Every structure is written in structure tokens, then in C-alpha cells.
Amino acid sequence: MKGIKARGYQKECLAEIAETVEAGGKRALVVMASGLGKTLTSAFAIEEFFKDRDLGRVLILCHSEAILMQSKEKYKGYFGEQYSYGMFTSHARTTRSTDFLFATFQTMRTYRKEFDRSTFSYIVVDEAHHSHAQTYFPTIKYFEPEFLLGLTATPDRLDGQNIEEIYGAPVYELGFIEATGRGLLAECDYQLVLDDMSQEKLDECLQGNESISVAQINRTVFVPKRDEEIVRLIRKYSAEQEDPKTMIFCKTIEHARRITKLMGTEATVVHKCQNSLDNDLALEAFRSGKVRTIVSVQMLNEGIDVPDANVIVFLRNTVSKTIFYQQLGRGIRLSPGKDKVKVLDFVANCERIQTVLGLKQEIDNFRMRPPHSDEGSHGDGDADSREKFTLNIATPEFKASKVDILQIVRGAFNRRRYWSDEELILILQTKSRELGRTPCMKDFNNDPECPGSLTFVDHFGSWNEALLAADLPLNTITNESLIEKLQAKAKQLGRTPSFKEVMQDKDMPSAATYRQRFGSWAQALRVAKLKVSYQTAAVSEGVNRDKMLSALQKKAKKLGRTPKGREVNTDKNMPCVASYRKEFGSWNDALLAAGLEASRKVRPSHRQ
């Protein structure tokens, strides 16, 4: 073994895993913030597990081939050349027996039965929050290792179910707030870039307009910047960082291409619609320093390790705290010569400001729980003296007026009668944290301080669609029960129910739930042994991106305006909003890709 030693917090984690093993446990879940070295922690745990005997075969599972390649190099660097290592992915399937096998869930799903159930003595599942996905869980269930270890930085992203059902409660947790408070991550110099904020409009808000809403503040106070100005400011503020190496998160592919072009030869782009070879080459060029800036759309959120990246730029909003922390996590790993990351946040809206100020308050309020032995790791040992997280708001007017933006936001939240989709998602997530579970419709109908459940249904098409938009687990229901309800509906109607009829029936699960469980609406009907029309099958299963965009454009032409989400959800000849979100990243991105105006209207609440 090479002379790599566990850090103090890793020793804490290993002690908890060892205690589980000694007690006869066969599984463990470790929750550790991005940048703390989960992969090496698992290597230490494997070494400890086999310390008194020969190493058994080890399987490392993950959804991402890029993450597996990184893990393979780290394991090889730690365990050495005396052991054998193999990849089992769509690009390379090692058929010989190796000590360590690094496999994607997608490939193992097809070939798992070529292995005996007890082939692997130890299994590590990286990014374990994906485990309940229908394409992943059968593989975990199939194998019977001596020990199963799940690793994740984001346990609350549960793919609709609770991963504790698979791994049990976490044996060790060290989240972003505590890790930052203990000085285990790079200092974060967080800059909210609000240079173009309208001081005049802000003054109007401060004059006590009783009807002002968060959405109105977002529309009037915060002025969107042009791309050229954004690039100028990125260059200006990143120059404050020595030898800047920059990751930029964009909202759409078109936006990413524009930003990359404006950045010039110093930048490269990665996104899911680009072929994997081009993405791999772009990422390698960024890692090696051939280019100093990488622009991303819906990539780099998880597991991609570039320790010397020291500038993070947010040009896209996300209502999901999970994704926010994942993207922030790309820059917070400590590395030689780096102890600080510069974050430039151009997402100028009240919700984002509230999130960032809340994050800073949590870190400032953190009190270390002794004893901690973090000595020996870069940056540890002087946690009390480090700034950890500094927040700057880049606008002279804002600083001069000494305005507490949270006061404005809270006042708007308390007085509002109108809601935007972003606000409703934030409310859902807040309610979920308060309850410690996924909220149900009656939680809102019985709370006079909240919008009624029909408001969520109006905005998102169904209650479950609202939960999905908020990245919350759906209230679970078995596939058998779903089919029984579908058959009962068909019996009631005397025919196959339409998508619209199921969507509008308050006693039925959302049609989107059927899509999620069975792959498509048409397939759900087939499983229920109901008649499927050619048109239903074509709409449900045969629509590509171009046809999806064409359907949107035709709908807009027919209406004479941008269609609303619920109008699309109830049109049996169109894919649902969830399909557009899945394909394009968000509903607004789909509208923009179709050349339509993004949907930013605020609709009246049903509760009076």
C-alpha cells in the first residue's frame, strides 16, 4: 500500500463502518460532502475489511463511466499494481476475473446474471442516492456480497424513494455545513453579482407597497444582463483569483454555446447532447490545463473531480438545493496551492439571495462538536481562524442603502396572493423540511399561511408533478395498485381512460406516475391489458426532440401565445410537461428551444 493516510474525519467514518461490521452488519451508508474524499474513504474501508485475510473480489458500481474511471485511478494509486483492475461499461467489458471491477449500472443491468450472486465479497455503490432507480435497484438486489457500502453527498435526492430501505440509516454523516465549519473544505468567497440591480425600483419596493410579491420584485428590481456583460464581469472578478480555473453552469445548450464563443479559445463546452468522446476530450483539456474554462449544461454536477478548479460561475437558477450544493461542490475541494474558491452568482432573484444568505447564516452559526482530530489534512487544525464563507454583494447601491433583502422577501411572502412556479417549489421544499417527509395535499389545505393544493395542481398539472418539480419523493404506491386503479377507471368508463381523464381525476394517481413507473403511458395501458390506440402509442413512445418542439410550436400557433403547462398536460396529442423537462432540462428551456417566450407569468391562487 502507498503511504496515503486517512484524515481525522475519515478515521471517524471508518470507526463507524468497522463497528457495523463487528456487530454483524452487512451494509452501511456514508453521507459525506463533495470534496471530502469518499472514494479514498471506501478504499480504506475495504483494506480494513480484509486486513486479516486475502482480498476478495470488489465491485464498484456507479451510473457514470467518467466517475468510475476516476475511482479506478484512485484505487490503483492506493492498492498498487499487485492487484488487477477492470472496467465493465458500454465501452469496455472486462471478461477476465479482476480483483476490482468498476461497472456502470446500465451495463451491469444487462449482464449481471453472467456473474454468480456471491462473486463479489465487497460492493461499493458510488452516488448511492440513485440506487432506487428502476434501472439500478435490480442489480443491487441481485448480488449477495459480504458487505455493501453506499456513498453519497446528497442523500435527499432519493429518486422518489428512501435509500435507507437499501442501506439502513447513515452510519456516518458529514455534510457541507459541518465540513465547512470544521475547515475541511476550501474557503468560499461567494459573490452575488447584482451590478445592474435597479436602485429606483428597489426604493419603490421599500416604500411599503402592500401588494408587492416576490415575483414582482424579481421582475422589477433585478435587471437581466446581456451575455457580453456577463463575460466581462466573469473576467473581471475571476482575475482576483490567482491562476483562475473556471467552471460555468449555464441554463441551456444555446446559452452555453454563446458564452463559450464569447469566452474565446480559453473555453470549452460539455453537455448531454454532445457525443461522449467530445465531452471526454473537453473535460481532459480542462483537467490538464490546456483550456482554463469549461462551460456546462446539466453535466459536472456529480463526481467529476478537478481539485484545482477555483472559480465557480452560476448562470442558471435551480430550485433544487441538491443540485445547488452539487455544483458548488465542484470547486470546494482543497488541493495543494489552493485554499479558496471564488463563486460568481449571476442568478439575481430573491429566492437565490435567500438561499445564499441562509447558507452563510448556517455556517456562521456552526459550533464544532469536540473532539475532532482533523490535523494532518490540508487546511485543518486552524478551522476557527479561517473565514470559511464570505459573502459579497457586488453593487455599490445595495451596500450604500444597507437594505436587508430578506426583510423585503419575507414581507412579500407574508402578503402575497399570487405565486410563481419557483416560489411554489420553494414552499414545497420548505414544508417538506418542516414535516420531515413529503407533504400531502391536506398539509396545504389545512394551513392558512400556505397556498392551497389546487394552486399546485393548476401550475404543474397534478400534485405529483409539483412534487417532481420540487425534487421530492412521491408518496409511494405499488405498481400493482396503480394497475388496479387504472383498470377500475376503465371499468367505470366502459373503455380505456384517456391521459386527460386520469390527469383530471383527483382520486387517481397522476398520469406522470404511470409514465415514471412503466416507461410510457401506452406501456402502462398495455400492462393493465387495456386497448392502446395507434395515436396514443405514437404520442407516448415515438416522439423525438424535433417532433416535441414541433408540437409545442403548433400548440402556440393555435393558441396565439405560449402554451401553459396544464394546457400541454391535458392535450392527448402532446407529450406531457414532465417529458419536456426530462428532454430539455426544464419547461422554460423547452419553450426557448421551440423559439417561444419563456413562461414567467404569475397565476392567481385558488385559495381566497
Image: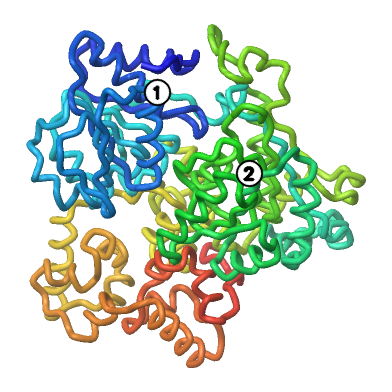
Closer to us: 482 or 358: 358
Q: Say which mark, if any, is on residue 270.
A: none
What residue do we see at 35% from left, 35% from top?
A: 72
Image-based side of 480 in relation to 435, left or right: left
Disc nearest the viewer among 1 and 2: 1
Compute the Cα span from label 1 to label 2: 30 Å
**Colour scheme of the picture:** rainbow
Q: Quadrant of the N terminus?
A: top left
Q: Mark 2: which amino acid?
A: Thr
Look at the picture and state if 338 lies above or below 162. above
Q: In the image, what residue type sits under mark 1? A: Thr
Q: Which residue is drawn at the image coordinates 58% and 69% (left, top)? A: 604
Q: Secondary structure at mark 2?
A: helix
The residue tagged 1 is 41
Q: Residue at x 73, y 44 (%)?
A: 406
Q: Is residue 27 above or below residue 69?
A: above
Give coordinates of residue 425: x percent, y percent: 52, 54
Secondary structure under the numbered disc 1 in the rendered image: helix
- The image shows residue 244 at horizontal and vertical percentages of 70, 43
Earlier sequence position, callout 1 versus callout 2: 1
Q: Is the C terminus in the top left, top right, bottom left or bottom right quadrant?
A: bottom right
Q: From this viewpoint, which residue is outermost toward the right? A: 400
Give the residue pinned by disc 2.
355
Query: Can residue 269 be seen from the camera position used here?
Result: yes
**How many other residues sit within 10 Å of disc 2, few (<14), some (14-19) or many (≥20)?**
some
Q: Nearer the viewer, residue 227 or 363?
A: 227
Image coords of residue 134 (percent x, y):
23, 51
Q: Is residue 473 above or below residue 117?
A: below
